[in-house]
Amino acid sequence: MKNLKTAFITGATSGFGEACAKTFAENGWNLVITGRRHDRLTSLKEELEMQFGNEVTTLCFDVRNQEEVNEAIDKLKEKADLSIDLLINNAGLAVGRGPIQDGLTDDWERMIDTNIKGLLYMTKAIAPFMIAQRKGHIINISSIAGKEVYPGGNVYCASKFAVDALSKSMRIDLVEFGIKVTNIAPGAAETEFSLVRFKGDEETAKNVYNGFEPLSAEDIAETIYFVATRPAHVTINDLTIMPTAQASSTVFHKK
Ligand code: NDP
Ligand code: 8X3
């Protein structure tokens, strides 16, 4: 039997977000999938609708632009019957991995605007749906980089520490409305993350995962699905998930 819940996933055009879209669709959820790459959103929608028969809505926008965020959500409000049960605040990125003294302002702004401000704009736009329903779940994707800093992590780590703090704070603000808030902190996972971080340098991106088995996007999607499907009275507040070969943000057991 179909589960008629709706998950709203930011950053569904690759990595964790795309894997979540597939996992939730397979389990009968309707989806709102978002990202900036229109072609990827369209082909994912076609694939999921054909395979699982779910309703998949695509919204193409940049989470850094509050006007674009609000316009996209206004489009959703035109669907009178829409309820959003789950928001996965996943869209995010790292750009660069150098010491603070060599950092590029543009890279810093991309990380802060996407990882912190984008998450805030999305939450501000979607929380009213959940408050009206007196239920809902917001899952924020932080990182092990939001628990421990590492050399060259500076602004990316700060942005993910901010996500960790916002998760704690949002949980307090939203508890009276029955809204769950979960913070997920993954270690190294092989997605397009490192390709973006190293600005398209495929060799450097690949080297990040040499000598150990990283997490996959599917590992994260499976975990998020578990978190999202606990009974109504149970919330997983915070979850750190690491490759077995990674003990901390800097300690890896490599072959
Ligand atoms: P990917 O690069 O594979 O996916 C990132 C997603 O974010 C893409 O769908 C991208 O879509 C979207 N995105 C980025 N910037 C924007 C923007 N300005 N507006 C809208 N969407 C945007 O990386 P991951 O799947 O690995 O990363 C997902 C999240 O997980 C990020 O928040 C990342 O920081 C976090 N994370 C990743 C880890 C890893 O090792 N991979 C570990 C811990 C946390 P598009 O380009 O189409 O806009
Ligand atoms: C991504 C994991 O350790 O490269 O958040 O920062 S790490």
Image (cartoon, rainbow, N blue to C red):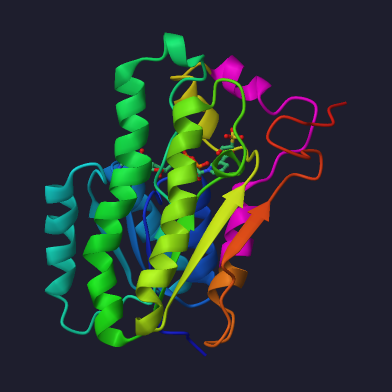
Q: Residue furthest top?
A: 102
Task: Give ligand 2's quarter of the image.
Answer: top right
x and y, in percent, of residue 202 in the image:
55, 19
Front residue of 175/31: it is 175
Q: Residue furthest right?
A: 255
Residue shown at the point (29%, 53%) measured from the top left? 120
Q: Is residue 50 visible?
A: yes
x and y, in percent, of residue 116 in the image:
35, 44
Image quarter of residue 82: bottom left
Looking at the rendered image, the quarter that the C terminus falls into is: top right
Please state the extent of the stretch shown in magenta in the rendering.
Answer: 202-224
Residue shown at the point (63%, 59%) measured from the top left? 239
Any magenta on residue 13?
no
Left or right of residue 207: residue 195: left
Q: Main secondary structure of the magenta part?
A: helix
Is 209 above or below relative to 28? above
